[in-house]
Image (spheres, grey):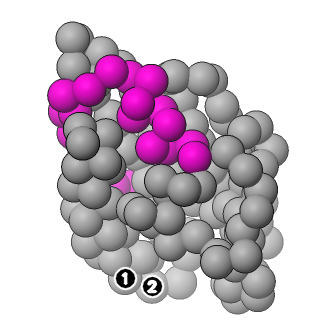
Amino acid sequence: MLKVVDQILINTPIERVWEILTNPEFIKEWDDIPENYSGGPLKLNGVIEWEGHAKMVVTEYEELKTLKLNLYLPKVELDPSNYDVNYKYTLSTNGDTILHFEIGDFSPLPNPQDYYESTVEWLNTAKAKIKELAES
């Protein structure tokens, strides 16, 4: 199994971090979403699609707790039932907010190490930006 697992402590209420994770106005500050995305805040079964490249579907949504998006890659010649690449964000609190990340499993994909390494790089930038947005 090839997953990226990380977490970050954010000195702000959990509601603020949830807003940063689910509101497209904030998502575009820490992640790449299509310019023409007009789907509103993320919710269960919501879809973000990069035409011909990738699609993310919200498969788990528990407000202020869990947000999970499954990634589908049409260019990968694998049946989507043969891989489960997802981005899972879990929130908890101990006075501050702890944002947990679990991303993967990349192992069934072609060149899985490339996906893993680019995700580690992306996450290092994204989590710092999420923290900055939430604490400002």
Q: Amino acid at mark 2?
A: Asn
Looking at the image, do the residues carrying marks 2 and 1 touch, with CB atoms under 8 Å apart? yes
Vertically, is 120 above or below 14? Answer: below
Residue of label 2: 111
- SS category of the residue bearing label 1: helix
Q: Is residue 3 visible?
A: yes
Say whether residue 17 is magenta: yes
Tell me what residue is drawn at x 72 percent, y 39 percent: 43
Q: Which residues are magenta?
A: 1-23
Residue of label 1: 114
Quadrant including the N terminus = bottom left
- SS category of the residue bearing label 2: loop
| Residue 123 placement, left or right of 109 | left
Tell me what residue is drawn at x 25 percent, y 65 percent: 125
Mark pair 2, 1: CA separation: 6 Å
Q: Quadrant of residue 90?
A: top left
Tell me what residue is drawn at x 64 percent, y 78 percent: 35
Which mark, residue 2? none
Q: Quadrant of residue 15?
A: top left
Mark 1, other Cα within 10 Å: few <14 / some 14–19 / many ≥20: few
Q: Amino acid at mark 1?
A: Asp
- The mark lying in front, picked from 2 and 1, is 1
Measured as percent of width and height from the top left, residue 87 is found at 51, 51
Q: What is the residue that sits farthest to the front in this orientation?
A: 136
Closer-to-camera residue (109/13): 13
